[in-house]
Amino acid sequence: MATSSSAPTIPPSSGKQVKIQLTTKQLDIALPEDSGPILVDTSQSLLNLHYALFFGSKTDLTFQISAEKSQRIPFDFLINGAILRTSLDDFLTTNGISAETVLHAEYVPAFVPPKHAASFEHDTWVSSIDVLSSAETKAHQALILSGSYDGLMRVWNTSSQVAATSQYLGDSRFVAATKAARFLSSTRVVSAGMDRVIRLWRFKEGESMTDNSKASVLHEADLQCHNQMVLAMDVQSDKQQLLSASADHTLALWNTDLTTAPVLNSETTTTKRQKRISTPAQIAPLSTLQGHTHHVTGVLFSPHVPNQAYSISSDNTLKTWSLSTESVLDNRPLQDPLYALTALTNMHLLALGSSKGDITMIDPRTSTAMIKVSTVRQAHSNGFVSSLANDPGSQYRFASGGFDGMVKVWDIRSLTSSTMTIDRKLDNDSKGGKVFAVKWDAEVGILSAGEDCKVRIDR
C-alpha cells in the first residue's frame, strides 16, 4: 500500500491549517507506522478529520483503512483525553494553542446511535426493568423483566410476548405499585414497592421460545423490615445478597439463600436445627443501616471493595458504607436531592442524578473526597434524573432517563452535550412522558420504561 513521508494536504484549503498526528490503540483500524502528521484545514468541521484519516492529497495515496470501512465506521477524535466536538479553529482558540503546534489526536470508533426496535405495551406505568441474558435461558433468547404500577411483574421474550406474570399479593384495598424488580438468577426474581415488602419469586421458563404454557413466577418468600415503601434495590448474585433502600431513611442488607437466611418468625421454620423454611418464608435482614435523614433513593454494592456499598438520598448526600461494621465510611453532601445512581466501574466513578436535572460524576474513594469530577447542569431540562445505566460495552458511556421524557447517552470524555437523545414523547400518544427506568444491556440494547405504559428497546 502506498505511503508518503511528506504531510498530505486535504484539498481544498480555505484558511489556516494545522498538523495533526493521528493514532489509535486499535490495531484493526491503525494507520501504517510511517504515516506522518497530516495537514488539516482548521476552519471546517470534523468531516475534514474523517477525510484526513482515509485519504491524502494524492489520488494514489490511501491509508491502511479502506474507503469501504470508512463508510461503515464513524470516528471520534480525542485530544488530551477529551472528544473534539467543535472545529479545530475553535479548539485552538479556546485552549490558546498555536496553529504551529503539532496536535496529537487519538481516533476511536464513535458511538452509533441505536434505532427503535420494539415496544412492550402495559396497562399502567412501568417502573422497573431488568434483563436475563440468552446464555442463561433454555431457549437461548434474552428475557426482559418489567415491574409496573399495577403491582405485577411480567417476564417478556424479545418478540414482545409475555412469558409469565406474577400473582398480585398486595392489599386488596389499594394497588401497591412495584417500584423495583430484578433477576437474582435464571430461576429467581425479586420485587419490592409501595407495600414495604420485598418478595422473592421462583421463576420457571416455558418449554421453548414459543411455548410458555408452563412458565410461571411463584411467590417464595417475604423480606420484611421497612416501615415505608421500598424505592430501590441492588443484587450481588454471586454472594446471594441484596441491598434495599427505603423511604423510611434506612438501607437493609439481606441474604437471599433461604437455607441460611435469618427467619423473621421462628414459627415459620419446620426444622430449626436445619433452618429449613416453609413457603412463603418470612425473612429478617442481616443488618439495617441508619444514617440518612430522608428517603434513601438508590443503593449500589461497590464493584471494587468487598463488603462496601453506596447510597444516595433526598437528603442531598452520597454515603459510602461498610457492610461488615454497619457504619458510614464517607459522607458527600451535594446541592440537591439525589434520585439516580450508577457506577462506571473501570473509571472508579459514580454518576449521580438529581431532582434539578443535573448529573454529577464523583470518585467515591476517600482519598478523593474533595474532588468532584464534573457536573452536567440541566442534563434533563424538566427536572428529575430518574434513572442511570452504564454502557456494558464502554467504560466511558452511560445513559440517563428523566421526567422530561428523554433518554440520553453521555460520554465522560465530552460532557458538554449528550451523545444522542431518545425522545419517548414522540411515540407516547397522550399517556405522559416521564421516564422511570433505564437499563443498558449488551445483548438487548437500551431499554427504557415510564409513564407512557411501555418498555421501549433501542438497539
Image (spheres, rainbow, N blue to C red):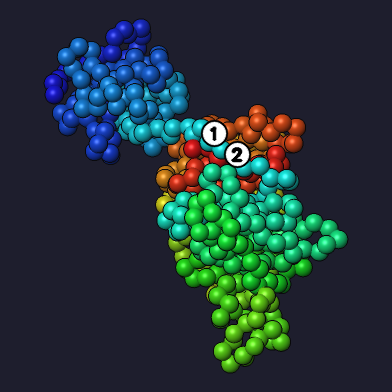
Query: Residue 349 at what x, y percent from top left?
Result: 49, 51
Rendered position, 150 above or below 276:
above
Residue ID at (53%, 36%): 117
Query: Residue 188 at what x, y percent from top left?
Result: 56, 65
Residue 354 seen: no
Indicate left or right for 147 with 95 as reference: right
What mark, if any, has residue 63 been given in the picture?
none
Rendered position, 326 above or below 43:
below
Rendered position, 354 above or below 201:
above
Indicate left or right for 288 with 91 as reference: right
Towards the viewer: 443 or 142: 142
Which residue is labeled 2 in the image? 119
Q: Of the residues shown, which amino acid type is indicated by label 1?
A: His
Q: Of the residues shown, which amino acid type is indicated by label 2?
A: Ser
Indicate left or right for 80 with 397 as reference: left
Q: How many marks?
A: 2
Q: Describe the element under mark 1 as helix, strand or loop.
A: strand
Mark 2 residue crowding within 10 angstroms, few (<14) / some (14–19) / many (20+): some
Residue ID at (24%, 24%): 66
Mark 2 vs 1: CB contact within 8 A = yes
What mark, if any, has residue 116 been given in the picture?
1
Q: Describe the element under mark 2 as helix, strand or loop.
A: strand
Snapshot quadrant of residue 261: bottom right
Q: CA distance from mark 2 to mark 1?
A: 8 Å
